[in-house]
Image (cartoon, rainbow, N blue to C red):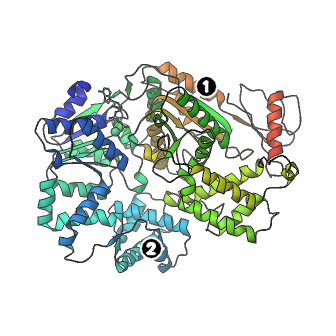
Amino acid sequence: MLAGLDPEQRSAVTAPAGPVCILAGAGTGKTRAVTSRIAHRALTGQVSPGHVLAVTFTARAAAEMRSRLTVLGVTGVQARTFHAAALRQVRYFAPRLLQGRAMPELLDSKVRLVTLAAARAGLRTDRAAARDLAGEIEWAKSSLVEPGEYVVAAAKALRETPHEPAKVAEVFVAYERLKRANGVIDFEDMLRAAVWGIEEHPDVAEQVRAQYRHFVVDEYQDVNPLQQRLLEAWLGGRDDLTVVGDASQTIYSFTGATSAYLIDFPRRHRNATVVRLVRDYRSTPQVVGLANAVISQARGTEARLRLELRGQRPPGPEPELRIFTDEPAEAAAVAARCRALVAGGTPAREIAVLFRTNAQSEAYEKALTEAEVPYVVQGAERFFERVEVRQAMVALRAATRAIPGETPLRDAVVEGLSAVGWAPDAAPAGGAARERWEALAALVQLAEEYAATPPVLPIGEAAAVERPVTLADFNEELARRAAAQHVPTVEGVTLASLHSAKGLEWDAVFLVGLSEGTLPTSYARTPDQVEEERRLLYVGITRAREWLWLSYAVARSPGGRARRPSRFLPQLDRSGGGTERAGAAAVARRAERRRPQVVSCRICGATLLAGPDRKLGRCPTCPSDIDQDLYERLREWRARVAGAQKVPAYVVFTD
Ligand code: ATP
Ligand code: MG
């Protein structure tokens, strides 16, 4: 087992009982080292597997750890998420601590009670606003902030609060009361109950501590104060604890996670064995070069700990940056490439498409379905299985009776969605609420696309093509797409959000939607929030073993408003550290060359995008002698969006 490890990893694996801290970048073998440490200690008789509690942050990571241990010949280790470990403990001790009373029911969402609590505090909230408030209460509770301390704490943490802080605090108080009155608890209460059980009941503490003797926390950079408190309760002053993390991968600070515990670990545990790893075993030097380029420009506390990764693998294919006219074109190209990779022998399960928000998933689900590439959506339901999307579809079907047939499709859909509380200009600030808003915005976008490309009708009905599409047509289209997506796939290309991709790796990774407003998301306003977005990009890049594709689409839908490329893209040129500097620099130079320039027509004022490698003679709105092929394509788009208010034209930069 030790043979497959480098000297630094080996020192972490063989360190004596006591605190161990592995601080290292992505792909350096932290998870491998920590799993090997458990196995090594178990197989040499230093610990019994049943006494080890290994905590991670996702169920998939916990399962991954159990399977790695099984391969190493060790079974019986408890590898769980914080939530699962706490829930197990609370359930086990509930009969004793509650003296026969029933265990309160666990709320799977705060939203309903928060809506009631907001009403008590005199706030009228739709579901989106309630979700923002719920997110804020989750942050406070995970940060051990009591309702009475909220106003001061929120100011100190520079929170962008969904309402005036005093009002949020009022909702928080009302929510806690309602919860008690209804005899229910939320997830944070459950963690608190686990802490309370230990801190207030010596017999429980004794039993828990006899069971758990050796602790491991993977992805420790994303621990929040409440989870840390629980960890300390389990430890009860003991220090046989191994923590592993990378401050550059903290991506949950919006819910209270902080890398401070990781960073301070060596100071808090003076006797700790501290191991730093820099060899990257996961990715090609080109991918490592891009990862170094992104993170070398990070600001903030984690910068102190940053270590440049050194690629260990032989060079592979050059990472690609691609720019598309619109999202459907981007998704179609990604699907085509996935198909080609699969045809070339890469198993579909070794491919991932990663995006910033779950709402982006739909375009890829559709494109992969059309390309007949199997896929699985990770950590979220498929687009058409999401509750809000199903509710919206019901509302749209109901709306066909009320909305006149000649209403433009987009307006009809927006009006139909108002029935489920959605409004185009009311994008909530963040968290859960934002995802819902975006999922429904994706429906409006679908409607725009659908209106721009009327369905191909069977011969004989050709005359009907001229008729504008109606809401009823669109509902049929949605039903058709939803049905197409229900084809169950056992194994396929992973579609996942960047958040849920943490700790995982694939041969080929597509990072899509790299435009301003998406990554970084438009609700990242403070410098700290932008830094978290940069770390997300770093997490995304470092998931790739071989192939890495970065892309963005100029417009959401064909003919839509132009967006700028992500501010992080031009930064990819300052590469360093990957053994193949030249590779990364070349990608960055290409990126720079392909960056579109925004130009406006001197005659009609239309917005145009041009790049130095494509000559744009004159505006296509005013016919001219520009490149014939390009002109045809522009004309085609114009025809498709005829009737729309804004008629921008775009130059194709890709292929
Ligand atoms: P992340 O920060 O993304 O969680 P990590 O540091 O936990 O990454 P691992 O997942 O443990 O990294 O390892 C990355 C890849 O490198 C895995 O495929 C692992 O098997 C491989 N690897 C780790 N250490 C070595 C080694 N010493 N020799 C060869 N391969 C290794
Ligand atoms: Mg890991």
Q: Is residue 580 left or right of residue 91?
A: right
Residue 113: image tag: 2
> Compared with residue 183, is residue 433 higher up or lower down, i.e. above or below?
above
Q: Amino acid at mark 2?
A: Leu
Mark toward the viewer: 1 or 2: 2
Name the residue tied to disc 1.
590
Badge 1: residue crowd in 10 Å (few <14, some 14–19, many ≥20): some
Q: Is residue 651 left or right of residue 503?
A: right
> Compared with residue 543, is residue 124 higher up or lower down, i.e. above or below?
below
Instruction: Classify the position of the N terminus by image quarter.
Output: top left
Secondary structure of the residue carrying tag 2 is: helix
Q: Position of residue 555 (x, y in %)?
A: 68, 44
Residue 262: image tag: none
Badge 2: residue crowd in 10 Å (few <14, some 14–19, many ≥20): many
Q: Quadrant of residue 577?
A: top left
Would you say residue 271 is visible in this rendering?
yes
- Quarter of the rendered structure image containing ligand 2: top left
Q: Residue at x 71, y 30 (%)?
A: 611
Instruction: Classify the position of the C terminus by image quarter.
Output: top right
Q: Position of residue 493 (x, y in %)?
A: 50, 39
Compute the Cα span from label 1 to label 2. Answer: 52 Å
Q: Is residue 47 left or right of residue 125?
A: left
Q: Position of residue 52 (x, y in %)?
A: 19, 47
Q: Is residue 557 left or right of residue 404?
A: left
Q: Amino acid at mark 1?
A: Arg
Q: Position of residue 25 (x, y in %)?
A: 36, 34
Which one is nearer the viewer's eye here, 124 or 480? 480
Q: Residue at x 75, y 71 (%)?
A: 402
Which one is nearer the viewer's eye here, 392 or 519? 392
